[in-house]
Image (tube, rainbow, N blue to C red):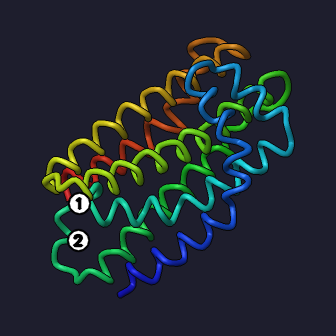
Amino acid sequence: MLFNILALISVLICLSLLKRFAAIFPSLMACIIRWKESVNLEASVKLSNDRDKLAFAMLLPFCLTADRFRLYDPKFLAGFDDNIRLALTIGIFLAYFIIRSIAAKFYRPKGRGSKCYKIADKSSLTFFTILTLILLTMGGVMSFIGFDPAMIKSAMLWVSAGIYALSLLRKTQIFVSGCSIFTAFLYLCALEIFPTGILVVSALIF
């Protein structure tokens, strides 16, 4: 019941942002191909604001997809009913994004490197939006065709890993354009590798 209500809310939110999505879609795709497109996107106040709103709107659909296809499936969630499990999944991902946001603000440099840092940090929203759109499409198409749920889950996890790896590559390229490779690596550890590692480990161990 909770899933259906939240899914309906997600659809209504996405429909309200459809015009913005159509306008920003070419820029999102360009960010996949070249890291400098992330710089161009941030240079446009309208495009960056639209991207931020789309990323926020994608949060609920992403959590619903993760719950529906058990992309995040730690053992401790097995004992809960569907509604509580969904609520906990949403809470866990919200906590992840909050922790990452706090880390981003804490490690933000001052001076010459602050611009590149902001662009690299915001690029996560771009790739998160792209990933959610891909997962939603995969889930709908593969479920309609009749693929086995385990196969859908496996395919989604591999795609998620691929998009995340590409996001790290583009983020590294942005960081390196404004700081040393060593500093870029430290930023990646603080903003991405450490919080994401905790999330992955929690799914594998607990």
On the image, the x and y values in percent for residue 34 come to: 62, 18
What residue is at 53 percent from the left and 70 percent from the top? Answer: 10
Image quarter (top left, top right, bottom left or bottom right) of the C terminus: bottom left
Give the number of callouts.
2
On the image, the x and y values in percent for residue 15 come to: 63, 66
Mark identifier at residue 73: 1
Q: Residues within 10 Å of mark 1 (few under 14, many from 20)?
A: some
On the image, the x and y values in percent for residue 11 come to: 54, 70
What residue is at 23 percent from the left and 83 percent from the top? Answer: 81
In what element is the residue under mark 2? helix
Of residue 83 and residue 10, the one placed in the foreground of this image is: 10
Of residue 116 and residue 10, the one placed in the foreground of this image is: 10
Image quarter (top left, top right, bottom left or bottom right) of the N terminus: bottom left
In what element is the residue under mark 1? loop
On the image, the x and y values in percent for residue 119 come to: 72, 32
| Cβ atoms under marks 1 and 2 closer than 8 Å | yes
Q: Is residue 83 above or below residue 171?
A: below
What residue is at 27 percent from the left and 48 percent from the top? Answer: 201
